[in-house]
Image: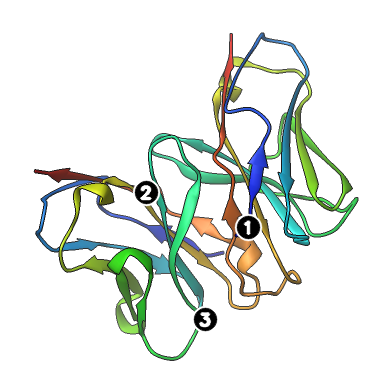
Amino acid sequence: AQSVTQPDIHITVSEGASLELRCNYSYGATPYLFWYVQSPGQGLQLLLKYFSGDTLVQGIKGFEAEFKRSQSSFNLRKPSVHWSDAAEYFCAVAPGGNAGKSTFGDGTTLTVKP
Amino acid sequence: DVKVTQSSRYLVKRTGEKVFLECVQDMDHENMFWYRQDPGLGLRLIYFSYDVKMKEKGDIPEGYSVSREKKERFSLILESASTNQTSMYLCASRPGTIGSNQPQHFGDGTRLSIL
């Protein structure tokens, strides 16, 4: 069975600073990988996804993520954080060929300092 | 845009009551899901459905049941509510077959409190 770990429960960055949120997964083959964002009181919104091909994927709101098979990682990055990026971020992994069986990480809460 | 609508944002019920949470999606998606979200535990899958009248257990189905009589509607039922079912409940839908690589679309959640 697949699993996903988000090592950082809470991260604080200053507005304008760069951001990297970590995600490590465990799965025997190439998985489907997703990053979602959840603003307070809202559901989850997809930021980006990786299935195959180029290991650097671009998403919405200026986010990108890089798939590194050798490190079993799929870290989310943004070069310059905005105050509106404060939210909870979830990494999810699904077995290739079955995105419906996603397993979610515990989430990382991002606080943005002015 | 896909719209997944959960009937209540906040709900307060009493222990032992039968509770219904409703979810409707407007994009003719085949697959629908119910999760609960608790601090520090991420999202945990309760049940999902890949077709009308079809359902499968997720990771934590105990104490819950589901109903999918129409393609657009997926109901979560707490047969006899207990305080440990106080949580945020999220509904999601997804197009395609069970093997599809399409991501899920989420509703805004129902925060359920059981007193």
- Mark 2–mark 1 distance (CA, rounded to whole Å): 24 Å
Local packing at callout 3 (Cα closer than 10 Å; few below 14, some 14-19, many 20+) is: few
Q: Label 2's element? A: loop
Name which residue type carries label 3: Ala
* Camera-nearest label, 2 or 1: 1
Identify whether A35 is placed above or below A89. below
Using the image, determine if residue A38 lies above or below residue B79: below
Q: Nearer the viewer, residue A63 or A28?
A: A63
Chain at numbered mark 2 = A
Q: Callout 1: 10 Å neighbours few (<14), some, many (20+)?
A: some
Q: Residue A95 is drawn in which quadrant?
A: bottom right
SS label for mark 3? loop
How was this image coloured?
A: rainbow
In the image, A57: left or right of B65? left
Report which residue position mark 3 lands on: A29
Residue at 47% over, 70% down? A33
Q: Is any atom of residue B59 visible in this view?
A: no
Answer yes or no: is residue A45 visible.
yes
Residue occupied by mark 2: A107
State the residue at coordinates (44%, 40%).
B41
Tags 2 and 1 touching, CB below 8 Å? no
* Foreground label between 3 and 1: 1
Are the residues under badges 3 and 1 in a single subunit?
no
Question: Where residue A99 appears, x then y in whole percent?
Answer: 61, 68
Q: Which residue is mark 1?
A: B2
Q: Amino acid at mark 2?
A: Gly
